[in-house]
């Protein structure tokens, strides 16, 4: 006897196609794509047993990988829309695994090789046209409709994993928005585990963030205000299932925002924002493995400020200025703020060419500039804002450190890495001048830090997150220029110079722990349209990192020699190709890195040599 079985997707599509004419469904598959990635480098590291994503950051520079992304949008009626995304993201499904059959062995043969399809981005969206409700969206969203310091796009990859309910409508002359966002387990206090006293493995499935926002135009000024609340619950210890189990709140996080923007005198664009966060837990540090709050049980509140001034009508054709003041409290905490998905500051940030200096896989650093994220890193030592001698393994990492935001662990070397701006205060002045032939820009940024303090209490609420002593400032200078040369059939050229001076006197009681890091680098590139469909470019960059800091004993971590000179330099040659046809695009980036330095801060100079390549092929339909 045969049984007929259908997958839920097939049933849904069949019902849609069989709908009566009055309910004709318009199916749109645009945006679907097949994506292939190829990595090759002379580290010859393949992530064979860790079963991580196939990317440089996860520990590999070898392998070929294919993903399929199927976008489906169904317009069911003028007021009803639904959609979903079917994504293959089997994290260990290399071509060499042959769909999960390529290698024997109990450890290596696992479901991560099977190229399974996963449901992503499923939503239902209503536009009923009521006088009080314009739109309702149930299911997934990227949550980019809110301010990135409050609720932002939560994840670099598969950012539509986050589910919730969103509503928007008119309110007199204003617009109101409200949402409940289901909080992933890993973003909950103590990563969803709760305190040791009580069970939270059930309550964590109901945890979320409530947020309400109002936008109101007042003359030429646009105002916006929001308030959000997150309560983490556990079962009460004396609760019994026979009469319904009671819950209690053991941690909560509230965030408030007020911002305004407008034009002044038809010359200046002004934007200002004020944020306030309050975090509280009733459970001591010993019971809650959350680096944000220390024992004893306590709370912390802090503010964040931003002010942007844009001057476009300067009287000089092509000359504009932008200034930004920022002051992000060292205790500002917004659990759902954007991490790597939104660049929240004007500055270019730290020198990406030295990203994760000390990790052999990252000898060449990152090729794209940093972005600055607003969220609190989830791990104190590995994701805080370490000084140049306080970072992981004391290797001299920049703000954001080895893994400044945890989403860096899913990025390749050509993708923008993220650093947390927690505790930053200072300003950026950016000038742009475009006379028509040589567009150029210049930036100066000065950063101080709200956690510049001395002898901070070892039991203070931030003592597990910051160092006890810090006296640090950072200066950033950047100049860029580009030009199209009318030679050899047309060449496009670009030049960049960057200087970063990072100083930390650490304890003011002694000069032995003083540290200074100076990054100096320049890069230039020349590109040419080699064919109607093919563009190629050749680039060269030279980078120096001169560190003056204590040499530490490898056994104890104690200072063995103050003021030691760590000299690091490297040259990077880059070859890049981009090829495109209608519905198809391919790219290749190959780099050769050579130099000499002290990546491990051991006092021993070594030669560095790396080759790395990433190629991609994508068909979009």
Image (cartoon, rainbow, N blue to C red):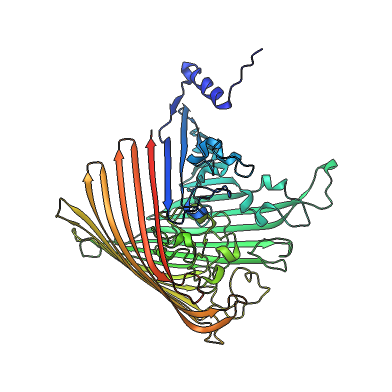
| Residue at 39%, 44% in the rendered image | 616
Q: Vertical placement of 599 versus 195: above or below?
A: below
- Give whichever of 341, 325 is nearer the camera: 341
Is residue 561 toward the left or the right of residue 369 in the image? right
Is residue 248 toward the left or the right of residue 63 in the image? right
Q: Vertical placement of 269 versus 183: above or below?
A: below
Q: Vertical placement of 255 versus 390: above or below?
A: above
- Position in image of residue 170 (x %, y %): 49, 43
- Give whichever of 423, 271 is nearer the camera: 423
- Position in image of residue 178 (x %, y %): 55, 46
Q: Quadrant of residue 163?
A: top right
| Residue at 58%, 74% in the rendered image | 467
What quarter of the picture does the N terminus occupy? top right
- Position in image of residue 67 (x %, y %): 47, 39
Is residue 439 toward the left or the right of residue 160 in the image? left
- Whether residue 225 appears in this view of the structure is no
How many numbered marks appear?
A: 0
- Give whichever of 604, 118 is nearer the camera: 604
Looking at this rendering, what residue extends furthest in the front direction? 104
| Residue at 38%, 47% in the rendered image | 615
Looking at this rendering, what residue extends furthest in the top direction? 1
- Whether residue 446 appears in this view of the structure is yes
- Position in image of residue 340 (x %, y %): 48, 55
What quarter of the picture does the C terminus occupy? top left
């Amino acid at each position: 006897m045969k049984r007929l079985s259908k997958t839920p997707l097939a049933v849904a599509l069949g019902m849609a196609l069989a709908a009566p004419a009055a309910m004709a469904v318009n199916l749109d598959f645009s945006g679907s794509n097949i994506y292939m990635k190829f990595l090759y480098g002379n580290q010859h590291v393949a992530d064979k047993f860790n079963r991580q994503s196939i990317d440089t950051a996860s520990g590999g520079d070898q392998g070929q990988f294919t993903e399929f992304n199927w976008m489906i949008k169904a317009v069911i009626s003028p007021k009803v829309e639904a959609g979903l995304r079917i994504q293959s993201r089997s994290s260990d499904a290399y071509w060499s695994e042959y769909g999960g059959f390529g290698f024997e062995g109990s450890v290596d043969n696992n479901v991560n090789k099977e190229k399974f399809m996963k449901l992503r981005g499923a939503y239902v969206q209503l536009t009923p046209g009521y006088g009080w409700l314009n739109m309702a969206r149930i299911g997934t969203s990227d949550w980019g409709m809110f301010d990135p310091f409050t609720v932002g796009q939560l994840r670099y990859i598969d950012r539509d994993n986050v589910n919730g309910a969103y509503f928007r409508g008119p309110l007199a002359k204003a617009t109101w928005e409200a949402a409940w966002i289901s909080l992933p387990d890993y973003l909950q206090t103590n990563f969803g585990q709760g305190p040791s006293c009580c069970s939270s493995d059930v309550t964590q499935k109901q945890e979320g963030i409530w947020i309400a926002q109002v936008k109101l135009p007042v003359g030429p000024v646009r105002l916006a205000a929001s308030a959000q609340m997150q309560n983490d619950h556990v079962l009460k210890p004396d609760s019994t299932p026979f009469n319904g189990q009671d819950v209690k709140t053991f941690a909560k996080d509230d965030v408030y925002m007020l911002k305004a923007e407008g034009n002044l005198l038809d010359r200046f664009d002004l934007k200002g924002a004020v944020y306030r966060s309050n975090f509280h837990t009733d459970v001591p540090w010993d019971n809650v493995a959350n680096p944000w709050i220390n024992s004893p049980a306590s709370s912390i509140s802090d503010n964040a400020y931003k002010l942007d001034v844009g001057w476009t009508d300067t009287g000089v054709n092509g000359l504009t200025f932008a200034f930004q003041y920022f002051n992000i409290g060292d205790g500002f905490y917004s659990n759902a703020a954007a991490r790597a998905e939104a660049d929240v500051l004007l500055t270019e940030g730290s020198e990406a060419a030295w990203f994760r200096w000390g990790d052999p896989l990252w000898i060449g650093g990152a090729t794209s500039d940093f972005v600055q994220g607003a969220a609190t890193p989830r791990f104190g030592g590995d994701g805080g804002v370490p000084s140049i001698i306080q970072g992981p393994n004391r290797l001299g990492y920049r703000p954001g450190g080895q893994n400044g935001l945890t989403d860096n662990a899913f990025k390749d070397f050509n993708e923008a890495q993220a650093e947390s701006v927690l505790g930053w205060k200072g300003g950026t002045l950016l000038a742009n001048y475009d006379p028509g032939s040589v567009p150029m820009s210049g930036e100066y940024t000065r950063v101080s830090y709200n956690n510049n303090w001395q002898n901070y209490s070892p039991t203070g609420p931030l003592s597990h997150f910051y160092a006890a002593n810090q006296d640090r400032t950072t200066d950033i200078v950047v100049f860029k220029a580009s030009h199209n040369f009318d030679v050899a059939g047309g060449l496009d050229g670009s030049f960049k110079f960057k200087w970063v001076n990072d100083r930390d006197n650490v304890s003011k009681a002694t000069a032995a722990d003083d540290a200074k890091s100076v990054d100096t680098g320049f890069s230039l590139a020349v590109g040419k349209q080699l064919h109607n469909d093919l563009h190629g470019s050749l680039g060269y960059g030279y980078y120096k990192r001169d560190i003056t800091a204590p040499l530490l004993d490898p056994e104890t971590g104690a200072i063995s020699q103050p003021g030691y000179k760590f000299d690091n330099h490297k040259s990077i040659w880059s070859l890049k190709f981009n090829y495109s046809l209608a519905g198809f695009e391919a790219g290749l980036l190959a780099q050769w890195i050579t130099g000499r330095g002290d990546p491990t801060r051991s006092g021993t100079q070594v030669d560095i040599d790396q080759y790395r390549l990433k190629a991609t092929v994508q068909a979009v339909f």
